[in-house]
Every structure is written in C-alpha cells, then in structure tokens.
Image: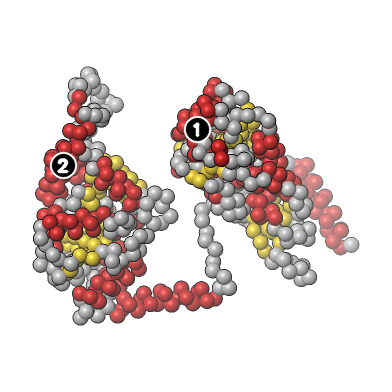
Amino acid sequence: MKGGALIVVGEDYGEGASVIQERTHAYALKSTMLMLDPRPELSNMVRIVEHGFRLSEVSNMPALLELRIRTCHVRGSFECKDNVAPAISTRNLLEQPADFDYTRLAHPPVTFRHEKLKVEQRVPAARAYIAEHKLNELFDGRRDDVGLIVQGGLYNSLIRALQMYGLADAFGDAEIPILALNVTFPLVPDEITEFCLGKRAVMILEEGQPDFIEQDILTSLRRRDVNTPVHGKDMLSAAGEYTVEVMAAGLEKFCARYLPETDIEIGKAWRQGNAARREQVAAQLSDPLPPRPPNFCIGCPERPVFSALKQAQRDAGPVHIAADIGCHSFGTFEPFSFGHSILGYGMSLASRAGVSPVMNRRVLAVMGDGGFWHNGLLTGVQSALFNGDDAVLVIFKNGYTSATGTQEIISTPDEEVKENAPQKNLSLVDRDTTIEKTLEGLGVQWMRKVHTYHVEKVRKVFDEAFSTEFDGLKVIIAEGECQLERQRRIRPWIAGLLREGKRVERVRYGVDEDVCTGDHACIRLSGCPTLTLKDNPDPLKVDPVATVIDGCVGCGLCGENAHAATLCPSFYRAELIRNPNWHERLIGQLRAGLLRLLRSA
C-alpha cells in the first residue's frame, strides 16, 4: 500500500453491540493491519488519528481505528489544525494513471513476497514509529513495584475502578503505574519489557477473548528472560464486557495478593453494596424481570407481515425460516420468534439452500430491500433460479436500508415523488418498481405484491406460496414505507398545514374495555409497544384488558389482526380532526347534544 489509509471502526464489546471488538482485533492480527484503540480523551484521540495516517504511511499497512461507544460519548474540547488540501482529489484530478507495479497486486506469487515484507519491514517500521512518537502512554504511579497494562479504550473505566478503591483521585492520577496501549497491534516488545522489568507483578486488562495481548506480552517477556508475574484472565472474567465493576473485582484480587497492606475496604463495601441492592430488588419481585430486547418501531410496516405469517402457519404448519440482517431480525424476538438462522446481510435465501433439500415443507427466506441489493440478488435469487429451487422469499420493500439509519438505496422513492405527492402521509415505495423489474429480468415467474398492512391479504398470499403446485422460486414483495422515514416526511408537512389553518385528520385506534374479553390474543399477534394492558374497570372481571396508549401512529395493525384472526370486535377507529370544516363542526355539535340527552335519560 502506498500512502496512508485509516479505517474507522465503530463497535464495542458491550452496550448492545452487534459486532464486538474482539473480532476486529483478530482480523487485524490475521491480516497484519495496525490496530488503534485510543484512550478516551479528545486531544489524545485527535493525536492518534493524525499519527494513525503517518503510521500507515511509514509501515505501508492500513490502520484500523477502533471507536467504542463510550469513547464516542466523551465530551470536551481540543485544538484544531488548519485543513490541508490533498494533492489528489475530485478537484485535483490525475492526468495520467499510476505506473504499473506488479508487486502491488494481490495474487500469487506476489502475495508470498508480501508475507515476507510484513515480518521483515512493515511491522518493524511500525514498532519503531510507535516507540519514537510515544503513541502508547505511560502514567507513573507511586507504587512502582506493580503495574497495569490496559487497552486505551478501557482507560477511563480502569481509572474509575481504581478510584473506588482509593487508588486514584478524581483527576485520574493513579497510585499504580499504567501503560495505556493506544496501539494494540503491533505491540512494542522493548516498551513492554521496560515497563515490566523490576516489578513484582503486572496485570493486563484486555477485553474479549482469546487473550491476544496477554499471550503476546507473555511470549515477548519469556523470550527476553523477563520473569515478572503477569496476570490477566486468571483474575478477570474470560469473556464479556469489562465494566467498572468487572475491573474492580480483578483489581481486588490483584491487590489482595500483591498489595496486602493497601486499605481497599471502601471498594469492597461498594461492590458488596451493589450486590446487596440487586438481591433486594430481586427479592421484591415474584419473578425475574423479562429482558427488553430491541423491537420494531411503532407502526413499522414489517410487523404486520410477521402477524400474517403467524396466522398462516396455523394452516400450513410450522415452517423453517431463514432470517436475515436488518429490521426484520426483530422478528426473531417474541411474540413472533421467527428465524432459525441469520447468516449475513442478504444471505437468507442462500443459507436456506442448505436446509431445503432435507425439509418436507417449503422453506421461507426473509430479506429486506437493502439486503436484496447488497447480497441477496446474486448469492440468493440468481442461485435459486439457476438451481431450480422450490423456495419462498419475502422481500420487505420499505424503501431504505432502515436498520442502519435509513440510508437510500437504488429502489428508494425519488425526491421528486416525495415532494410532489399530494398526500405525503401515504406510503410511496410502490412508486419505484426497480426490484420487480430486476426479478422479472432474471426470470422469476411467480411473484406477488402485497401491502404489508393488509394482514388478511398477506396471509392468503403466504397460504398460496406454501401450497401452490408451482415448482420454483416464489417471491413475495411486501410493500410498506419505513415508518421512521415516513414520520420525518409527514411531521413537517402536518405542521405546515396547521400553521396555515388547514384541515388535518389524524387516525387513532383504541379498545372498548366493555367489549374486551381479556384474551390478549391481539397482543400476541402484534407485539406493538402501544398495545398493552391495564386493570379491568369491571370489578367482577379479573383479567386485565387491552389498551392503546399514547404513541400510536394509527397504522391500523391491531384492527387488521382482529379482523384477519376473527378476534373480539373490541377495537375502534377514531379520526381526530384539527381545523375542521363548518359542516364537521355542525355535526360535532349535534352529536354532542344528542349524547348529553342520552346521558340525562
């Protein structure tokens, strides 16, 4: 590689991360890529970014910059430098292509030479730069007979844990020397050796497993005949997030063994108090609190499809479902619990191919339109058509790559369509037919389009797909615009209508508590956060009744489910009108007067 390349990786071991940091570390080791994990302090993070580019240039290796969630939430200030215009950009175009250099290609026999260069030149150059510019930080401590080595991203949590034992003050000055690794690969053996020499013991705080850093340090020390005792996973948890409490538990063991004269009773009391409070809360509950995993947004157009699928399986029987990456992954949670596998983004139809040959029933693959364009079109649809697979594919056509922030894709409705739509509150994804035309061009012969909120129609399409005699790929395109993106469009539109004094109609759904039987089948078929329970107003009835709370966006799924599954007719639809017309005001006054008469009677 020529020049510097810095790849920013946003991930974390905990905080609900979908890709935990240990995977990137392993990738960096295997691919011999620089791994930066900056100490969470803004000026230091800026410094590491700047040196990251230079380190990449010096070593001819790409650099991975890991930004954990807690690191990204750090506040403060830093001094900026003036921007430097790049020599090559869209404004400064190259007149001629680069010279041909066979040694820069990535295939044999050139790759064998690259493997030698990694060991002989690139890693040594990186280590020399790290040492020369002191990218890793050494924080002195009064008790220099012991030491702590920590990944840079965990430094703030470590300081907090030391504070709980009186081993650090509020300004971060610790009693024990700390080596903060802003660069976790490659490590600098001379730097590690110098830190460990003369110490009675050193503890390594490395999140994730396997313990890459700990093994590397132990190997380096033993080869140099440095016998300083090194602890890590033997005193800390082998896996999981290294929170302040987890670190504190390991520090407690370390201090008890090597600093027995240190008074750490304050820290012990803090940990014991936390444990006692958890026990007290647990004792007050009849059952443990259920977990609260993420879920579909209120009004998400994908929830109705899973409601319809739940009803369809009552006729077709249980179906193997290959799930996929995306918002529809939430269908794996209750109340749906759909999905036997999640292989990769757009890989559901491909992973289904490994199951279909041994299943007596047709297998269902679920895919979003983002996954369809990312991988599903080639590895899934093309392969299934080529092999003549008898499978069912549902494509959620919500118009965006919604799970990662509603990025636009090739089948996103055009801005002109959104701008000129007379009713901006309606779904607009049906205006773009790129997916349908692509499938037809590939040769898909069985294709059905349904609006996701029409639960009964969706259920019938599922029934047809599972029972039809057609032997081949069957594609169901479920249309319904992403609710997040839809709300972003209609809220300013509604606010503008209200400012102009124009009529605005808003739909809400509710439950007639006198009719509700307390069966709660509607909740089991929906899972909408706004459809919940409240105490039964009838003192002669024990079961709580269903209720629709604030937050309802009026998607109508609850009523659709009640109709499709033939549930109790307790749902009602209300139209809330602001700035009504004169005849609507008149009708409203007549209705109110009639209701007053009926009440008095």
Query: Residue sitting at 50 percent across and 74 percent down?
Result: 281
| Marks 1 & 2, CB-CB < 8 Å contact | no
Residue furthest toward the right? 601
* Residue 398 left/right relative to 160: right
Residue ID at (57%, 43%): 321
Q: Nearer the viewer, residue 51 or 230?
A: 230
Q: Amino acid at mark 2?
A: Val
Residue 336 drawn at (x, y percent): 60, 51
For numbered disc 1, what is the local secondary structure?
helix
Q: Quadrant of residue 116?
A: top left
Say whether disc 1 or disc 2 marks the residue closer to the N-terminus.
2
Q: Is residue 11 left or right of residue 152?
A: right
Q: Position of residue 46 (x, y in %)?
A: 24, 48
Residue 504: tell me if it is visible: no
Q: Residues within 10 Å of mark 1 (few under 14, many from 20)?
A: many
Q: How is the image coloured?
A: secondary structure
Does residue 127 sit above or below 390 in this rendering?
below
Locate residue 444: give its quadrant. top right
User: The C terminus is located in which quarter?
Assistant: bottom right
x and y percent of residue 240 in the render? 37, 60
Nearer to the camera, 310 or 285: 310
* Residue 351 seen in this snapshot: yes
Residue 63: horizontal and vertical position, in percent? 24, 42
Q: Which residue is mark 2?
A: 119
The residue beneath circle 1 is 380
